[in-house]
């Protein structure tokens, strides 16, 4: 019987522990940068393992901090590691790691804001694969700062929809942490209490896999919430094949009155004078019962509603830019975001 293939490992020379690195460089965690460091090697390895085989891959890590996850990534023999960290206090500890593996792995340390960084410029062109092929040897990994995780996710979903940035290289996979509640919403299926706009948006462009939870107690300092680890693999074909902004608008308005009949939210897609008539027409075209509540609508049914909306917009282009929220400026609109 053939022996099981041993996982490839790069052995790093002895380095101070992450705890010692934090002490050595006096890296007091900054709340404004959502700094919660994961201290336990077993959990760090579990996150990196969730990304699958990354040997010879190009791995971009968001917010490496003192470098606990970075070390685990490097031990798995990637071809290149791109580190994007906003806080320059971490540069010396990341340079220490880069130096320790300099003959084996190419490490780029970028001091900058992930929301303003064009990751694609650091990915070698030869990593490109066709969108319909298996995912490319490119991975995004990160114990994300809570303060930017949802906005980053929405931004990345839009890039996925346009096959831009890291997704110009194919269906680049992501292994990311979120507040547990956000991770649950991302993965929530029809009828779940957690089902919301974010569920439909994530699942429209990606296969969302909720991997496991990490207790807040595993972080230093301990955040008020637990964390969920999620992998996202872009779908070959989205469920709703329409522009991102249009899908986002329809889904957002439908979920804006979460506890009411979904047609109530759908009506807000149209100006007041035609609201009831147009929403009813849209629901008829989509064959959706108007008394269905938002969380009872399946992804495929959202697809039918979005396509019906698109047909109405073709007939009445003036409705396309109608913005209910803008109309309500000055009045109190409580809107359930994500
Ligand atoms: N990876 C480390 C770990 O797991 O222990 C640190 C994770 S900590 C939750 C989030 C990291 O993201 C911090 O190092 C923080 O400085 C960094 N960060 C916060 N906002 C950022 C941004 N906009 N762009 C890049 N990095 C950011």
Image (tube, rainbow, N blue to C red):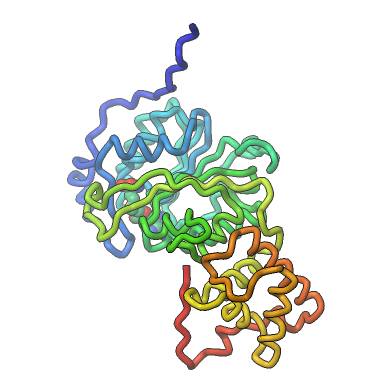
Give the residue at x 42% y 55%: 183
Mark count: 0
Q: Quadrant of residue 19?
A: top left
**Residue 87 in sight in this render:** no
State the image coordinates of residue 293 (x, y, percent, origin top left): 54, 71
Give the residue at x 47% y 43%: 82
State the image coordinates of residue 43 (x, y, percent, origin top left): 31, 39
Residue extending farthest right: 315
State the image coordinates of residue 173 (x, y, percent, origin top left): 54, 43
State the image coordinates of residue 284 (x, y, percent, origin top left): 72, 74
Q: Nearer the viewer, residue 41 or 90?
A: 41
Q: Would you place residue 52 above or below residue 39 in this image?
A: above
Q: On the picture, is 123 further left or further right than 38? A: right
Give the residue at x 55% y 54%: 118
Q: Quadrant of residue 266?
A: bottom right
Residue extending farthest top: 1
Q: On the picture, is 98 further left or further right than 89? A: right
**Residue 180 in sight in this render:** yes
Q: Nearer the viewer, residue 275 or 134?
A: 275
Q: Nearer the viewer, residue 43 or 25?
A: 43
Q: Would you place residue 76 above or below residue 60 in this image?
A: above
Q: Nearer the viewer, residue 151 or 182?
A: 182
Give the residue at x 36% y 34%: 72
């Amino acid at each position: 019987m053939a022996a099981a293939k041993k996982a490839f490992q790069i052995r790093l020379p002895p380095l101070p522990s992450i705890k010692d690195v934090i002490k050595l460089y006096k890296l007091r965690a900054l709340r404004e940068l959502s700094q919660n460091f994961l201290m336990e090697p077993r959990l760090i390895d579990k996150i990196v393992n969730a990304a699958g085989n990354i040997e010879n891959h190009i791995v971009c890590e968001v917010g490496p901090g003192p470098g606990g996850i970075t070390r685990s990534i490097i031990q798995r023999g990637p071809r290149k590691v791109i580190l994007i960290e906003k806080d320059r206090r971490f540069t010396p500890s990341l340079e220490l790691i880069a130096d320790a593996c300099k003959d084996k792995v190419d490490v780029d340390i970028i001091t900058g804001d992930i929301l303003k960084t064009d990751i694609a410029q650091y990915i070698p062109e030869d990593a490109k694969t066709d969108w319909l092929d298996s995912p490319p040897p490119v991975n995004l990994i990160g114990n994300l700062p809570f303060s930017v995780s949802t906005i980053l996710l929405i931004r990345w979903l839009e890039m996925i929809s346009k096959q831009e940035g890291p997704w110009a290289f194919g269906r680049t996979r992501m292994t990311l942490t979120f507040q547990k509640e956000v991770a649950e919403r991302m993965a929530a299926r029809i009828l779940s209490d957690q089902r919301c706009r974010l569920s439909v948006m994530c699942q429209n462009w990606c296969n969302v896999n909720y991997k496991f939870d990490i207790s807040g107690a595993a972080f230093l300092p301990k955040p008020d919430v637990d964390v969920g680890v999620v992998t996202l693999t872009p779908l070959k074909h989205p469920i709703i094949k329409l522009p991102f902004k249009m899908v986002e608008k329809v889904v957002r308005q439908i979920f804006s009155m979460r506890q009411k009949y979904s047609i109530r939210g759908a009506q807000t897609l149209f100006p007041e004078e035609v609201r009831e008539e147009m929403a009813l027409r849209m629901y008829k075209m989509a064959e959706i019962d108007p008394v269905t509540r938002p969380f009872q609508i399946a992804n495929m049914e959202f697809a039918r509603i979005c396509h019906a909306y698109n047909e109405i917009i073709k007939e009445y282009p003036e409705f396309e830019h109608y913005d209910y929220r803008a109309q309500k400026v000055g009045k109190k609109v409580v809107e359930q975001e994500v």
